[in-house]
Image: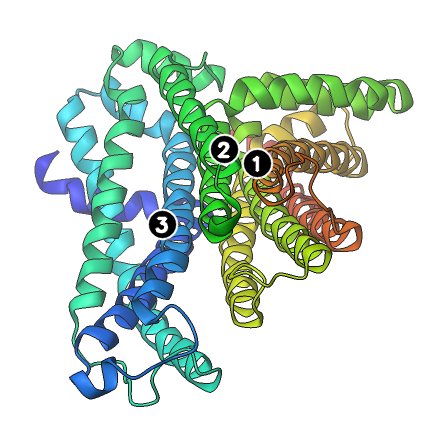
Amino acid sequence: MSGSVPMLAVGQIRRRPAAFAGLAAALFLAVAAVTLFGALVAAQLTAPAAVSRAPVAGPGLVVIAGAFGEIAVLVALFVVVNALGFTLRQQHRELALLRTVAATPRQVRRLVRAEVTATVVLAAVPGAAAGSLGARAFLAALQRRGMAAPGLRIPGTPVPMLIALAVALLVGLAASAVAARRVTRPTPAAALTDSSAGQGRTGVLRLLAGAAVLAGGVLLLRLAATRPAGELDKAGQAALLSSLVLLIATALLGPAAARLLAAVLAAPVRALLPRAGWLADANLRGYAARLSSAVVPVALLVGLSATMLIMTSTAEHAARSTGVTTSVTKASDVWLRQAELGLLVCFAAVSTVNTLVALTADRRREFALLRLVGATRRQVLYMLSVEALLTTAVGVLLGGAVAGAATGAFSRAVSGSVLPVVPGAACAWVVVGAAVLTVPGIVGTGLWAVGGRAVEEVGGERG
């Protein structure tokens, strides 16, 4: 098998284009983000002394790139890890079958590494190009607002692009090594049985990691809540970082949390729609890992967007009440936060669409089995619509809980109260946006997935 690993990797990518396209899009965004903020730092470091020391209206280019790039890059890498884990879960059956025909765990790991490396290389060049163009546009916008020296230019050095490639490759290989353990650790028969069952209990290591990350998020919340009045910018950064850490904990503990929320939300749905509601609830709770993969991007979108919107509204309300303008409420910083919000929403939206489309497309055989036992295409789509609404609701609740905790800590630092100022209309648009991305994505892909002949789908290869 050693000599055929590259061919097998290419075959797996061609076999599941939707899943690998989602991973490639996530890697594209990660490379672009690292390149963008790395190029901004390089512009400051390589500038002549007279230019780099010119006074500007703001904290400076390096501080902006570090503070705002930190969150953006972490979110991009989080999206990569989530997309990679989902892609490998879709390959579980094929990788387990390789184990049954004498492929060793080492060979399976080599195959996974080859897939990840090939996808990183494919995404690296366009991602680096997009990041370089984005850095030029962002620098020009900062210069128009007096937040960067007029003489600064993005250098032609390839160092930021090479760093971005190295970071994406290291994160991808590390995440793939962890994800591949589910296939390589058990015996071939056990791995194949686990893939046929479609789910498994959440591992102890994952639960422990989730608990540790959750504890870290709580510590960051405490740090944000205890910042003095003169350090509201640090409180805001700690609150935003805590929301990301809590979202990572949500991803690690997702199967259990998503199953519990789905059970609660599905109870009234089952009463109103006995058939479609019962089947949608059974699908969501029966495949907790799949549900977790679906709701985590939605929670990311809602959690980060709502956190930034509520923090800005809370800070502005406090400034109006006290008449004191802080770095959190300055027009320049508000613009920076709006730009960062747009970037984060872009990452989360791409992750949401990619994951949901690939998840639904992978269920063609399941839909065909339903049709063979008597369900019509319309009934399958009706069930899928109910699933989409429940998935949206679970993701919105998880993201809302994270945003509530983060903004409550920030509000405590700003006003002494844990009740933040919530911009109702803006947050409602966030929920609407999540629903617009989720429901049409699932139902539209489902419309395509149920289009073939049921007998051929069941008789053909899975996936």
Residue 302: percent from left, percent from top: 62, 45
Disc 2 to disc 3, how far (Cα)?
Answer: 44 Å
Q: Is mark 2 on a helix, strand or loop?
A: helix
| Label 1 vs 3, first from the N-terminus | 3
Q: In this view, does 28 lie to the left or right of 265?
A: left
Q: In this view, does 259 lie to the left or right of 152?
A: right
Q: Name the residue under label 1.
A: 409
Disc 1 to disc 3, how far (Cα)?
Answer: 47 Å
Q: Name the residue under label 2.
A: 221
Residue at screen point 55% across, 60% down = 326
Residue at screen point 22% across, 49% down = 169
Q: Mark 3 points at which residue?
A: 14
Q: In this view, does 421 lie to the left or right of 304?
A: right
Closest to the observer: 331 or 345? 331
Q: What element carries label 3?
A: helix
| Label 2 vs 3, first from the N-terminus | 3
Q: Identify which amino acid the numbered label 2 is placed on.
A: Leu
Residue 196: percent from left, percent from top: 45, 17
Q: Can residue 196 be seen in this view?
A: yes
Query: How is colour applied across the structure in the image?
Result: rainbow
Residue 165: percent from left, percent from top: 22, 58
- Say if 19 sits above or below 155 in the image: above
Q: Can residue 363 be seen in this view?
A: no
Q: Is mark 1 on a helix, strand or loop?
A: helix
Closest to the observer: 88 or 73? 73
Q: Identify which amino acid the numbered label 3 is placed on.
A: Arg
Q: In this view, does 382 lie to the left or right of 155?
A: right
Cβ–Cβ under 8 Å for marks 2 and 1: yes
Disc 2 to disc 1, how far (Cα)?
Answer: 6 Å
